[in-house]
Amino acid sequence: MLKIRILVAAITLASSVSIAQAWESLPSKAPAPADNPTTAEKVELGRMLYHDPRLSSTGTVSCASCHNTMAGGEDNRAGSMGVHGQIGGRSAPTVWNAAFNTVQFWDGRAESLEAQAAGPVTNPIEMGMKSWDEVVVRLKAIDGYQSAFTQVFGKDSVSKDNATKAIAAYERTLITPNSPYDKYVKGDKSALTTQQIRGMEKVAELGCIDCHSGAAFNGAGTFQKFPLNDNGYFEAKFDFKKDKGLAEVTKKESDKHLWKVPTLRNIALTAPYFHNGSVKTLKKAVEIMAKLQLNKELSDEETTDIVAFLNALTGQFPKQTMPELPATPGQTFNK
Amino acid sequence: MLKIRILVAAITLASSVSIAQAWESLPSKAPAPADNPTTAEKVELGRMLYHDPRLSSTGTVSCASCHNTMAGGEDNRAGSMGVHGQIGGRSAPTVWNAAFNTVQFWDGRAESLEAQAAGPVTNPIEMGMKSWDEVVVRLKAIDGYQSAFTQVFGKDSVSKDNATKAIAAYERTLITPNSPYDKYVKGDKSALTTQQIRGMEKVAELGCIDCHSGAAFNGAGTFQKFPLNDNGYFEAKFDFKKDKGLAEVTKKESDKHLWKVPTLRNIALTAPYFHNGSVKTLKKAVEIMAKLQLNKELSDEETTDIVAFLNALTGQFPKQTMPELPATPGQTFNK
């Protein structure tokens, strides 16, 4: 069951002081569910699966193709490109710190990283596998995966459940600590510029962080309506309402245009913006959010200050070793 | 100028003894041209460029997409998939040990790794950039590349020449030493099984290594006609002659069906086989080579022995760090 909490933007918030006290730095570890504890071997298996294009029908698209771990955790495209050059209708969310979302996908339809990982693999315009049974057959034919699954999950353990558990365990390591913001919050007052501090105060004062709350600035799994206020000009230009958000899944009128509150962590790296990737710059995205969600017109200085602060949410990416993908010597994976 | 040497397969070779003495292990370093010495900083820049999908029009295809450094250095597909799902007519050659080829591409039309690296980027069905000028504009807009180029090549040095030099320098590090074959040649007589040793003797006796000669089993830049002998059955089935090889470039009758001798290093990892990727297993590829190039029918045991030996040419892949691709904060790369 999908549990949904909806926050109404606290537009009328009188003081930023109490919120300012709640600034949190990013935890260095993400919580793992009881039935999927993180282990080093599991993370390594997950790292392989995550980067393996053989999880797609054509052998050309891996999780990393659209959620690029060498960059901002996504593909900097409006719609991602799946198998056979097909283009999706939503902009890939970043995988960095996704472990701190309590729901996944733009519409929050998955309750865990494990549930999310299962989706794109069999989506016909993403990775295009006919079924997870087909994926499992393919993985079982690769000796290196057989032995890696055995090591992590026991004998004869290649399955959808275990594959998505390993991918999720890997994703829980994709955390970007030590952003200038984090350093500032931890006491290094020189970590932010005065402009960034002005922006920080402004996002509190405006109420941005009433929804984008918590250490990951993602509202910890809350949903929000977007756009909240009607605006014919922006709608004509960016077509935000074409996609009904959660209602596309639930078909409920009350879920229309409801979206998971996305993280602001590393937001500077994930242009273009919004669920349909229709907005090319962070500056424009900030203006639009102020207008559509808070009914505020920002001055150019205010916008620039907020953008400066958002740039301070870019963290440090952990050094990663490239996985060595196990082979099927002498034959193709899709014989 | 493309210099071509053609070796006629030494079908009539009487003794394998002299050849057996020439077994060479893989050098740990590849030679670099005088105008592109390998440096650590250049390799790191090349590693970034090689893995950066922003070198393609769609932002979805990097060099690594088709020449996968997490696997056998290619994509295990018959034809690679470029931008917008377009499929090429030739099977991607492996990047591993490409530094030991003196000519590049299946048809050997590039004389260096540097020259090769320039090609796919502007090929409309591969990476689809309109021109290298367009690539340079894109790279120049990325501060992290500006500073990396400056560090390696000096101020204002973002250019096609320097980008391809950096990519080539990185590729020169993609060497896979310590295959069972190498260990055997260096004196570890237990490194090969008796079946693999039989296969090794067989490839010498048959004359396979007259063309696939040298440490990289690639004839050091020689060309060979394929197919050498006509065979209606294989031709009907695999359509080898449709592609005229080097003659597609030079338009010369004498270059018809001439191909660079490809390396046998890691051949077990690079199915499907031949220039058009039409043959799915290494076993079948060995049978076909024997018939079409040497006019020999191999017994099942001989074929299996040779395949066992070829599996002994799979080397050790160097541990690699994932590059961190420089960003364009707050905007897309293709604004």
Image: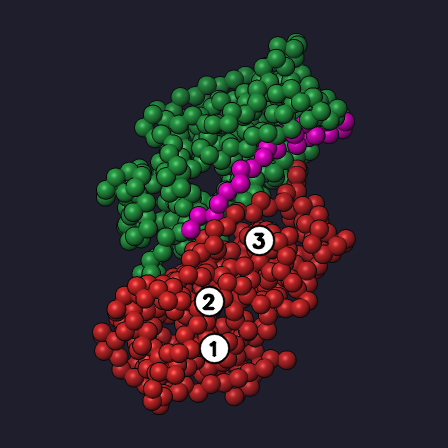
Chain colours: A red, B green
Tag 2, which secondary structure? loop
> What residue would you read off at disc 3?
A47
The disc label shown at residue B209, or none: none
The disc label shown at residue A26, or none: 2
Q: Which residues are magenta?
A: B300-324
**Up/down of B54 relative to B240, above or below:** below
Tag 3, which secondary structure? helix
Instruction: Residue type at mark 3: give it.
Output: Arg
Q: Position of residue B1 (x, y in %)?
A: 35, 24
> What residue would you read off at disc 1?
A219
Q: Residues within 10 Å of mark 2 (few under 14, many from 20)?
A: many
Of A193 and A96, the residue lying toward us: A193
Between marks 1 and 3, how big is the CA–CA gap? 28 Å
* Marks 1, 3 in one chain: yes
Residue occupying image coordinates x 42% and y 37%: B170
Residue occupying image coordinates x 57% and y 53%: A47
